[in-house]
């Protein structure tokens, strides 16, 4: 059975690291083959590294303010034949790793993503869920959990090193590479990503829908080349967020 490396980027995730790692271990038990867990500690000032180590993860440090570079640090230091990425505040379901290994073993798929389900729901979160499902179905660029063979990630140069929308860019790169290899980019059928609602819990369930409408000017200026406002928003929501 092929070795799987699960790469978990983490910026001050002491509240969530253990439960994410536990979800990976449960999935590893169902898979039954060798699995290594890599937590990439990004500018951590809390107990994330200690907790990850105590829970059996291999810890690597990274200081970049770019989530793609953080993931790539884990990917290119991984020992496994198969790479799976998941954010530290999220969880995978039990059959995730077994299904990934099976789909790759068929030779039909270059890799893929996973459908996203929130850990709790409200009306605005149902709307967010619907937007995700529609956009994924239209584009076929499933994200959340990314998975592919390590040699595939190496062939495309790892995650697209962008500060935002790196997931969609990486999915496009995997899909394009798959076409060259005669393989499809796909999504897990029987397992999902359990998506954290921690930002919604703190900032309100309308968070991202409000951001979309209240920052239209910021998005337009970014499209025209002025990314200063967008970068500040991304730092606040992701790179400096400690909630």
Image: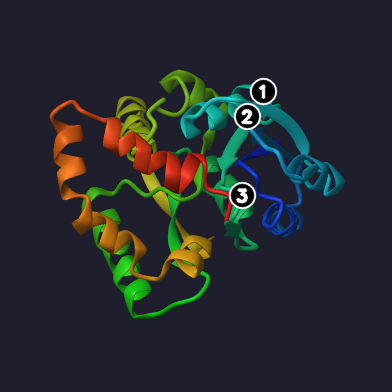
Considering only vertical position in the picture, is 75 above or below 14?
above
Query: Mark on residue 74?
Result: 2
What kind of element bears circle 1?
Answer: loop
Q: Residue at x 35, y 63 (%)?
A: 207
Which residue carries the number 1 mark?
A: 77
Image depth: mark 2 or mark 3 in front = 3
Which residue carries the number 3 mark?
A: 88
User: Horizontal placement of 159 versus 79: left or right?
Assistant: left
Whether tag 2 and tag 1 are in contact, CB under 8 A, the answer is: yes
Q: Residue at x 66, y 23 (%)?
A: 77
What kind of element bears circle 2?
Answer: helix
Name which of mark 3 and mark 1 comes first in the sequence: 1
Mark pair 3, 1: CA separation = 18 Å
The picture quadrant where one finds residue 7 is top right
Q: Residue at x 56, y 30 (%)?
A: 70
Give the percent coordinates (x, y) of residue 103. 51, 47
Mark 3 Cα shell of 10 Å, populated few (<14), some (14-19), many (≥20): many
User: Horizontal placement of 148 versus 38: left or right?
Assistant: left
Give the percent coordinates (x, y) of residue 88. 61, 49
Is residue 134 in sight in this rendering? Answer: yes
Q: The N terminus lies in which quarter of the figure?
A: top right
């Amino acid at each position: 059975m092929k070795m799987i490396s699960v790469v978990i980027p983490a910026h001050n995730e002491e509240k969530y690291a253990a439960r994410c790692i536990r979800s990976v271990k449960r999935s590893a038990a169902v898979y039954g083959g060798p699995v290594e867990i890599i937590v990439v500690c990004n500018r951590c000032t809390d107990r994330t590294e200690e907790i990850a180590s105590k829970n059996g993860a291999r810890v690597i440090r990274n200081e970049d303010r770019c989530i793609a570079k953080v993931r790539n640090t884990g990917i290119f230091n991984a020992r496994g034949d198969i790479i799976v990425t998941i954010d530290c505040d999220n969880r995978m379901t039990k059959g995730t790793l077994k299904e990934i290994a099976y789909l790759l073993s068929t030779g039909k798929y270059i890799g893929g993503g996973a459908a996203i389900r929130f850990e709790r729901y409200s009306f605005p979160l149902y709307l967010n869920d619907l937007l995700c499902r529609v956009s994924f179905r239209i584009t076929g660029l499933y994200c959340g959990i990314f998975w592919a063979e390590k040699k595939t990630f190496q062939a495309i140069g790892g995650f697209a090193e962008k500060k935002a929308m790196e997931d969609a860019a990486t999915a496009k790169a995997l899909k394009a590479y798959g076409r060259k290899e005669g393989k499809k980019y796909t999504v897990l059928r029987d397992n999902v990503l359990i998506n954290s609602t921690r930002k919604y819990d703190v900032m309100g369930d309308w968070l991202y829908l409000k951001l979309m409408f209240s920052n239209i000017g910021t998005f337009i200026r970014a499209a025209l080349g002025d990314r200063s406002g967008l970068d500040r928003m991304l730092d606040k929501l992701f790179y400096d967020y400690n909630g």
